Image (tube, helix red, strand yellow):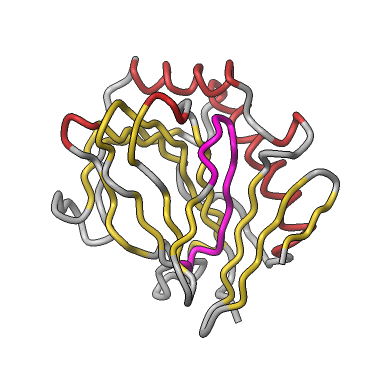
Amino acid sequence: MELHNVGVLFHTNVTFPDTFAYYDCENAPPHLHFSEEETQKIIETYDEAQSVRAITYNGLDLNYRRANKLNMEVISVEYAWVINKIAHIVSHANANFFKANLNGMLEDFEIIKYDSNEKSFYDKHVDYHGNQTLPRKLSVVIQLSDENDYEGGDTLVYTDREAQKLKKKRGTTNIFRSTTLHEVTPVTKGTRYALVGWISGPHWV
């Protein structure tokens, strides 16, 4: 089923035991997606800073996740425009589709670099951790790179039937429930940059 609402495309597929749902703003009004200039500015922020190895919930494991990251300080004035834009996008998606009880961004968003030189990837995982009082509830993936600048590096989300590939158009925001199984396939050519983060709230019921 596809739902069209004020220019925003929503997709839902009923699964068991969870409901898979994702939102993308590719066809949304301009204020609900990142422009080429904005995505380039975020990439330049990464390239000018000191990145670190991206880790898993259990720590560093290069056989499970191989990429580098730069945390964006949510309280930083320099990055306030990025966080404010994400907040508007998430608020719109939640009001029109997810309708979830959310508390906000309790963790820093991260700029992730997937490099073909080391075949960067992230194996199948979920972002939700049930032992947290306010767990990750919605996962946000913002495409910073031009999809023609690299090969591979697809974000795949899994339903009970098959994997679905998230949109790769530069500036597109994809949002899905953090309980959804997903992965990033190895980058085989070029470099992919993405901005990722999570919106927390009470457990799904």
Q: Give the range drawn in magenta.
A: 167-180
In this view, which residue lies farthest toward the right?
6
Q: Is the magenta stretch mostly helix, strand or loop?
A: loop
From this view, report whether residue 95 is shown above or below residue 67. below
Q: In which quarter of the image is residue 83?
A: top right
Q: Residue at x 73, y 61 (%)?
A: 2
Q: Percent from the top left, x then y, of residue 134?
A: 52, 67
Q: Percent from the top left, x then y, of residue 114?
A: 30, 35
- Number of numbered discs overlaid on the protein picture: 0
Q: Quadrant of residue 113?
A: top left
Q: Percent from the top left, x then y, of residue 112?
A: 36, 36
Residue 138 in the figure: left or right of residue 118: right
Quarter of the figure that contains the N terminus: bottom right
Q: Which residue is drawn at 54% across and 30% down?
A: 170
Viewer-proximal residue, 147 or 197?
A: 147
Is residue 175 within the magenta segment?
A: yes
Q: Residue at x 35, y 41 (%)?
A: 153
Q: Percent from the top left, x then y, of residue 32?
A: 72, 36
Residue 32 in the figure: left or right of residue 24: right
Residue 182 in the figure: left or right of residue 117: right
Viewer-proximal residue, 64 or 168?
A: 168
Viewer-proximal residue, 8 or 62?
A: 8
Quarter of the figure that contains the C terminus: bottom right
Q: Residue at x 68, y 42 (%)?
A: 25
From this view, report whether residue 135 is shown above or below residue 8. below
In this view, which residue lies farthest toward the bottom?
17
